[in-house]
Amino acid sequence: MASDRFNINSQLEHLQAKYVGTGHADQNRFEWAANINRDSYASYIGRHPMLAYIAIAENESIGRERYNFMQVSLSQPILLVSFCFGFR
């Protein structure tokens, strides 16, 4: 039983070292939220059908939506830090 627990923990540590978005023990909720937002925007930008769907839903061009997503994804960590520490 203890060996299974050790094996699962070592697999989790391996995944956390290999992939950035899986988090770690010292990560707070704002860093985790920034990772989720960054990964989501990167996914939207990288998948043309999803980007086309969002562009149609918002009645914008695909290039404009890609630009807007890049702007938001670049400014997202700054917004999260300012929200976290009360800078407005």
Image: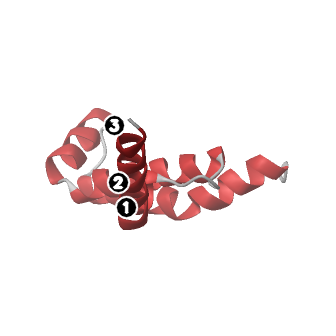
Q: Residues within 10 Å of mark 3 (few under 14, many from 20)?
A: few
Which residue is denoted by mark 1 in the rendering?
14
CB-based contact (under 8 Å), mark 2 and mark 1: yes
CA distance for labels 3 and 1: 40 Å
Which residue is denoted by mark 2 in the rendering?
11
Q: Amino acid at mark 2?
A: Gln
Left or right of 79 on screen, residue 16: left
As helix, strand or loop, the secondary structure at mark 3 comes to helix
Callout count: 3
Circle nearer the viewer, 3 or 1 = 1
Q: Position of residue 63 (x, y in %)?
A: 28, 60
Which residue is denoted by mark 3 in the rendering?
58
As helix, strand or loop, the secondary structure at mark 1 comes to helix
Q: Residue at x 43, y 58 (%)?
A: 13
Camera sees residue 41: no
Camera sees residue 20: yes
Q: Residues within 10 Å of mark 2 (few under 14, many from 20)?
A: few
CB-based contact (under 8 Å), mark 2 and mark 3: no
Judging depth in this view, the residue of 80 and 27 nearest the camera is 27
Furthest-left residue in this view: 49
Q: Position of residue 85 (x, y in %)?
A: 83, 51
Q: Position of residue 4 (x, y in %)?
A: 35, 41
CA distance for labels 2 and 1: 5 Å
